Image (spheres, rainbow, N blue to C red):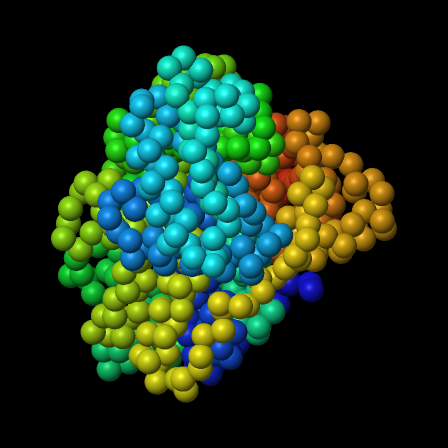
Amino acid sequence: MNIDRTTMLDKVKKETDFWDIVIIGGGATGLGAAVDASSRGYKTLLLEQHDFAKGTSSRSTKLVHGGVRYLQQGNVALVLEALRERGLLIQNAPHLVKNQSFIVPNYDWWEGPFYGIGMKVYDMLAGKLGIGKSKNLSREKTLELLPTIESEGLKGGVIYYDGQFDDSRLAINLAQTAMDHGGYTINYAKVTGLIKTNDAVSGVKAQDQLTGEEFEVNARAVVNATGVFTDDILEMDDSDAQDIIVPSQGVHIMLDKDFLPGDSAIMVPHTEDGRVLFAVPWHDKILVGTTDTPVESPSLEPMALEEEVDFILDHAKQYLTGNPTRDDIQSVFAGLRPLVSPSGSKDTADISRDHTLLVSLSGLVTIAGGKWTTYRKMAEDTIDKAATVAGLNEQDCITEDLRIHGWLKNVDREEHLHYYGSDKVAVEKIIENNPELGERLHKRLPYLKAEVIWAVRNEMAVTVEDVLSRRMRALLLDAKASIEMAPEVARLMAEEAGHDKQWQEKQVEEYKSIANRYIFN
């Protein structure tokens, strides 16, 4: 499947007929909505101002989970929905989602019974979509599974199971799934305004961010799925609209696997700021996070604060005998949660993670809040509403059992290219045709030159950052190594896409300026 962004965009620019549904925003929510709408047979277009999953959707804790913390808060309805969606996602994208064991270490006598009972409730709520039974662990078994855990005062632990995934890889596969069903998903196409007919939204104004060319699109319904930028689109619709988004920053650090060998993750159920802290194996590294810091205004490249990094390190030292310092951090990344607070409350820890669906007087459909795990249900609710607004023929949602692009049931997770799923064969074909492309881009990371070619040809990668941050995860895994990879990635992209030397140099400089923000030592 060769995807040509230019050809697709040219068709959109020439199209005068109405699209059934136009979606603004190419993160988890927007892409999910595009899959839902296109798979129902609706004429669907998604426009993303930057790259797919550029913002929050590539900066998660990489968990597909029911939300143990929501259970603590008594939000059983959200936990039930999330656990069900977790089960469906494992079925629909088995090449990207896997079972992950988590251990809650107990240092007080009451923690074992307390968390043990809580996890049994969690298991029960998952029902037939459960992925493993929780159980209490002895001190000896806990140390066996977590050999680097702080042993002083350790009483035992509780083991339970949740899902883990690669967020931006899933986003790319969702874009491909929408296109497999006839939808158009276009990155670097920024919506700059709404078109109205008799006070009703009837389309969007947009700009191609690569050429500067402006164009208009007619639509029967427009969906605002822009995450932390939701209020910007609401203001385009109504200049007096009240802000509903309270952005909250979550920071993660990446450490060497030596700090937590083995396959189990650690879950700390209660930190000083009331959040859950995770230390999770991911791509042969250890991901530790997260924080909950209110921020004033959204940004495409949020910056981790010194105190956030120190907070994570301080907590990591309490649970990891290696006592990681700043010198051990291989990458730091920050993401913004688009929390919805219609009441204007600024206490982000207490704001619900439920999603919110709004329809304005003009007919603009806005979906906000939520999380990756429930993206499919959010999309279903959104397209149900958008189809009603648009007056479209009612079509049933089919995404509960819809296989996501790349679906492959049995993948060997020890094999580097496994996350391409059924596309792995095609990536290997590139190497077969040119064995040099089977070489690694960097000795510290497993990524191959062929993956750059694949990303340009088949995954709409436009910039070096698209490749190193979201098609590969090099930026998040080892920021310094990714900078060293950048010149060769730029050369390969230029060769494939027909860019000159000047383009390569500019791309490398732009990438360095972004990647340096991920280095914190």
| Residue 102 vs residue 56, the one in the foreground | 102
| Residue 270 vs residue 46, the one in the foreground | 270
Residue 394 in percent (x, y) is at 40, 84
Residue 61 in percent (x, y) is at 44, 40
Q: Residue at x 26, y 56 (%)?
A: 231
Quarter of the figure with residue 8: bottom right
From the viewer's perspective, tell me whether residue 180 is left or right of residue 495.
Answer: left
Residue 424 in view (yes/no): yes
Question: Is 395 drawn above or below residue 133 in the view shown?
Answer: below
| Residue 402 vs residue 332, the one in the foreground | 402
Q: How many marks?
A: 0
Residue 116 in percent (x, y) is at 37, 37
Tell me the quadrant of the picture where the N terminus can be found.
Answer: bottom right
Residue 2 in percent (x, y) is at 69, 63
Question: Is 337 drawn above or below residue 154 in the view shown?
Answer: below
Residue 44 in view (yes/no): no
Q: Residue at x 48, y 57 (%)?
A: 129
Q: Residue at x 45, y 74 (%)?
A: 397
| Residue 236 vs residue 113, the one in the foreground | 113
From the viewer's perspective, tell me whether residue 138 is left or right of residue 487.
Answer: left
Quarter of the figure with residue 396: bottom left
Q: Residue at x 54, y 45 (%)?
A: 99
